[in-house]
Amino acid sequence: MSTENEWPLWEVFVRTKAGLDHKHCGSLHAADPKMALQMARDVYTRRQEGSSVWVVRSDQIVASDPSDKDMLFDPAEDKVYRHPTFYKLPDSVDHM
Amino acid sequence: MISSIKIPAAPELSYLLRLADTCLISGQRLGEWCGHGPILEEDIALSNMALDLIGQSRALLTLAGQRSGESFDEDQLAFLRDEIDYRNPTLAELPRGDFAFTILRNLVLSTWLKLMWERLRDSSDAELAAIAGKALKEARYHQQHAADWAVRLGDGTDESHRRCEAALAQVWLYIPELFEDDAVDAAATAAGLGPAWSQLQEPWLAEIGEVLGEAKLAVPPAPTFRSSGKRGLHSEHMGYLLAEMQYLQRAYPGGAW
Amino acid sequence: MYTQAMDTLREEGGDKPALRTAEEAQLQQRFDNRIDAGEFIEAKDWMPENYRKTLLRQISQHAHSEIVGMLPEGNWITRAPTLKRKAILLAKVQDEGGHGLYLYAAAETLGTSRDQMLDALHSGKAKYSSIFNYPTLTWADVGAIGWLVDGAAIMNQVPICRCSFAPYARAMVRICREESFHQRQGYDSLLVMMKEGTEAQRAMVQEAVNRWWWPCLMMFGPPDDQSPNSVQGMRWGIKRVSNDTLRQKFVDAAMQQAEVLGVTFPDPDLRWNEATGHWDYGAIDWSEFWRVVGGEGPCNRERLAARVRAWEEGEWVREAALAHARKFDLKEAA
Ligand SMILES: [Fe+2]
Ligand SMILES: [Fe+2]
């Protein structure tokens, strides 16, 4: 069966309350951007989960290749100096 | 079988019931789509709107019950009236039809309701004003949803355009009823309860005209036919709708749900 | 809802790895290690073909079950007895549509479009949970479905929240969060009728419970000794607890809830077993189960026909929206 007449897939990102990040919460099919936004609201915020919604065409997302995982992410492993807990300060100033 | 409740003939009560029943009966029709929509996402969207309308009707019927002097609750009013005591304009009760009909009816009614809610925020009845404030947000979304769809379908394929034209021609027959005043409107305006329905006509036509223009749909000629649901004289469809809706309340007298 | 149907299919080709190259063998080894370490597999990670196929089948069947499952209860939306119950039921059935949507999306990450999955449903190739081939004859069926069918579904579904395939697990977390409202509203509706209702209502509740009890026990699938796929499914974490264990857990919970409600189940062999600490129950009529799975249940044809009708009647709508979007894209590009 042909799927060229299928509505495109969109990824939905919802900000649950002001101040938080938009978080990926799922996907849906919609014919156009306006519809994608409305449907994201109807599908993914039925229980007051949202205060802001982003939608983006799934085919527009550029993702890292899982087979590159070692190359991309393992090098961060030995850079412990990027984490605040790396630095042991005197107790008197340790709430820095 | 439980016998029907009798509704006092007070114009202000009729004014509230006309509005409440518009929401109730539209919600009932829209709920019929649940599980049968053209695509899953839209199925969910239509159910959301049905839920909003049912919620609005509950608030309004509760208020109408309090104002009736008879302490009827929302369910007595929703399920135990005779057909002639339902006061929705006929348009709301017509069968759900195809998706084009549903969209165009939603466009017409949600625009009408939005304009109504905007004005009811200033009602002399503080509770009605509060209901309007909440319902307005919902109606704005319904209008947006219907308008977007009307444009997609009106300016989509030949088939969708043709279906929209047919649906619009049918919907248009029932439009005059939405804007004609009678004693109920006179009483409501005198009491500051809400606007006469005729006051909505001009802004309604402007907003609808804009959407239809974008949807490449011509405004149909004004009909000579006059529907009369808001005075209790409905279409043949209403009896079936009520038979279904009222079935359990009527069949299990004294039941608890 | 419901993962039952998966167990009813014979294994396709088993787990015999038809590996051709050393590289594939290495990938398979790495995959197995990750599974055994309890790691999640994401859609773009390498996975054995059999894993992909099994998951696709299970998730799509699960999705089909959610949307076919909208129909029996959906029957009663226009007839709900109060506005509160109407709103609750509409929201509940709508949720099931949402569940179908989340699950189709999870299955799509495996490389099959939703249209292809729907095509398999509409042509009768794909299965869905056979519980939905039973009719809803009275209003009490709505309560009984919420209490027993959603209750059984929850027991089936909760373990899958920890399934090895991450998109499925994420969808299940979302679904399980919404399900508990479903069971509670059903039970609450029955409770009101039993405690505050009339004699006629109580009879209606008992009659509905009588009809739904056995089909609900069947929802957990065939007994463990007749259930294919289980070992593999357990290893992959798409099945974490055996059919019989879940069924027993369900019976034990339901017995207690039935007592509070004041209804009985239509099984003369139900009795407390002091030794095991569980309720013993009578023999399930598996011939009925296979008959319904095989297409001869009371509503198989109606359910499928309703789905096909909705899809076909919606075709012009979907086409028009796409045509409009393309016109708009052209205008943008111009
Ligand atoms: Fe569900
Ligand atoms: Fe459910």
Image: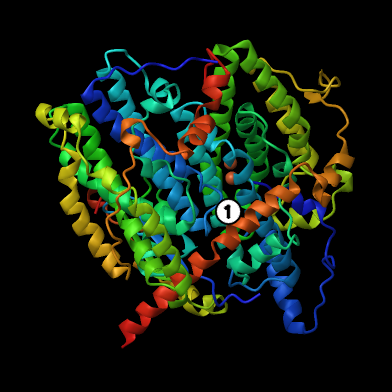
From this viewpoint, is residue A51 visible?
no
Left or right for B109, reference A67: left
Residue to which mark 1 is pinned = C100
Name the residue located 86 percent from the left edge and 21 percent from the top edge. Answer: C269
Q: Quarter holding the C terminus of chain A?
A: bottom left
Name the residue located 85 percent from the left edge and 58 percent from the top edge. Answer: C10
State the residue lying farthest toward the bottom: C334
| Residue density around tag 1, few if under 14, some if 14–19, many if 20 or more, within 10 Å | many
Left or right for C254, reference C327: right
Q: Position of residue A17 (x, y in %)?
A: 30, 50
From this viewpoint, is residue B104 visible?
yes
Q: Secondary structure at mark 1?
A: helix
Name the residue located 23 percent from the left edge and 20 percent from the top edge. Answer: B10
Left or right for C297, reference B84: right
Q: Disc 1 beta carbon < 8 A from ligand 1?
A: yes
**What is the chain identity of the residue bearing mark 1?**
C
Q: Position of residue C243 (x, y in %)?
A: 78, 42
Q: Quarter holding the N terminus of chain A?
A: bottom right
Q: Position of residue B16 (x, y in %)?
A: 26, 29
Amino acid carrying label 1: it is: Gly
